[in-house]
Image (cartoon, rainbow, N blue to C red):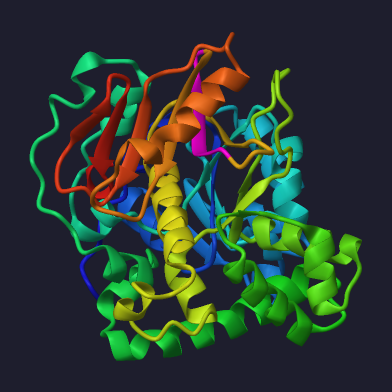
Amino acid sequence: MGDYKNRLIETRLKELFSYYPVVAVLGARQVGKSTLVGNLFADVVHTTVFDPVVDIGNVRQDPDFFLQNIQTPAFFDEVQYAPELIGSIKRKVDKEKKNGLFILSGSQNLSVLRDIPESLAGRVAIVNLWPMCTDELDGWPGTGFLQKWLSGKKDAFASLSPRQSRPTYPAIWRGGYPKIAELPDHLIPGYWQSYMQTYIERDVRKVANIGSLQNFGRFIGLLAALTAQEINHNQIGRELGVTRNTALAWTEIAESTFQWFSIPAFSRNPIKKISGKKKGFFTDTGFACYLQKISSPDVIAGHPMQGRLFETFTVMEIIKHLQRLPIQPNLYHFRSHSGAEVDLILEQNGILYPIEIKSKSNPSRKDIRGFAAFKSCFPRENIHPGLVVCAIPAVQKLSDDVVAIPWWYL
């Protein structure tokens, strides 16, 4: 096993546990939830990993008795396999009336995890843990650039220290799962094969009524092919021979198990008609590359999905860095019927921050036309100067109100 790699969310997570009786860390399987909790909370005196088959500690039969025999602070891993425990935790929390009692983790945001905010309302802080960003994988503490940029600070660019460029295609091909960082390239496809099987057998089969698991596996592969695009569930249904409603339900399962992330279109009384469809992203480009049978980083350069894989990778890097903020900005995308686009829009404090993502090292003014179209559609909105994230060697001003930045500066 490799050394523990610090996560950008650690400070926020520890602070939340000091102010809430329960903290829930949710994320896809094998993104490092248990490792994070084990390294961050040394004072945890009891850890239980629940199982979908075995009733650990008879918790499903008698959750109150199980909890009576647990010292706090306690960590309950894969808590979705013990849904009966949530009500008992609520009663325990209400009785003891103190913070820092329980840490919960789960790899499914379905069933019991959907009930956590309701059952433990006011008692639980929920944190999503994504695969690792490149700063975490490299042991870099992060520049905090996005936080400065979203605060409107004029030195957001000036204060950036020069950083060595990073190879883009290996970062995309490997993705951000912690175990991948320890493996040589030739062992990575085997890891994903095992991951896919475990994901379907343990996560999907147990929580969803899927008629054909093989067909659901095809669906996940199709989602990977559609990353960084607006989603048409009618089209997905036709491809798989299922109904639109089934395709929609399966997309919700993928999103609830943290394999898929979608953002809505920005549409606030626009002057011109714009697309209202959600745009979806596969949450890890390494997994997406495996599902698309991309056998090495070099293949990405000439692959038809090259641009969308880079966009997916960059959007997820941004989302991972935003996790450190006390308030998460709203996320949108923009596309007019004429084809003008802005890949990502962050909204915070009433200000819109448009971001364009380009898989190139020499962006030009023609790459920023979407910003002008967005402004013309929404002339009354408070729109911040735009940002182009790409593989440019250093920060460069493209126009009076647009700056290009290397993706590794995020």
Secondary structure mostly taken by the magenta-highlighted segment of the chain: strand
Q: Can residue 55 be spotted in the picture?
A: no
Q: Is residue 263 magenta?
A: no
Span of residues in magenta = 340-349
Residue 336 sits above or below residue 286 on the image: above
Q: As drawn, is 162 to the left or to the right of 389?
A: left
Residue 402 sits above or below residue 304 on the image: above
Q: Residue at x 48, y 68 (%)?
A: 305
Q: Residue at x 18, y 19 (%)?
A: 155
Residue 256, by quadrant, is: bottom right
Q: Residue at x 44, y 53 (%)?
A: 311
Which is more toward the observer, 65 or 4? Answer: 4
Q: In the picture, which quadrant includes the C terminus?
A: top left
Q: Can residue 175 be spotted in the picture?
A: yes
Which is more toward the observer, 33 or 156? Answer: 156
Residue 57 sits above or below residue 134 on the image: below
Which is more toward the observer, 91 or 174? Answer: 174
Q: As drawn, is 46 to the left or to the right of 165?
A: right
Q: As drawn, is 118 to the left or to the right of 348?
A: right
Q: As drawn, is 51 to the left or to the right of 88?
A: left
Q: Is residue 341 magenta?
A: yes
Residue 264, by quadrant, is: top right
